Image (cartoon, grey):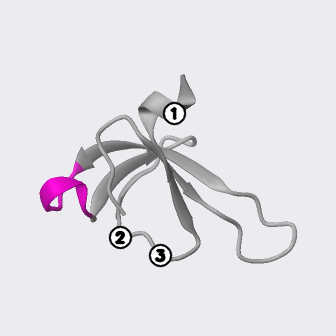
Amino acid sequence: MRATVGDQLVQHGRVVGQHDKIGEIVEVIGQEGNPPYRVRFEDGHEGVCSPGPDTEIRHREAQQ
């Protein structure tokens, strides 16, 4: 999994009825685009994430 600043990180809900959490990657801490990432979520919360199998990266150029 590789990302750049500005990409979206989407954590899919793990149970029925749980919504996805969407955040913007504001810092890539790992080398060459690898995790961990500092992510700012829609509610304003920021955290450091090492994405798991329930996570998707939506690249900035694919969103346009």
Please name the amino acid that badge 1 sits on: Ala
Q: Which circle marks residue 62 in the picture?
A: 1
Mark 1–mark 2 Cα distance, whole angstroms, equals 22 Å
Disc 1 element: helix
Residue 37 percent across, percent down from the top left: 30, 57
Residue where numbered disc 2 is placed: 50
Instruction: State the image quarter where residue 48 is shown.
Output: bottom left
Left or right, 13 with respect to 46, comes to right
The residue located at (57%, 43%) in the rendering is 43
Mark 3 or mark 1: whose residue is earlier in sequence: 3
Most extreme residue toward the front is: 62
Q: Residues within 10 Å of mark 1 (few under 14, many from 20)?
A: few
Residue 31: say if magenta.
yes
Residue where numbered disc 3 is placed: 52
The residue located at (50%, 46%) in the rendering is 23
Q: Which residues are magenta?
A: 28-34
Q: How many marks?
A: 3
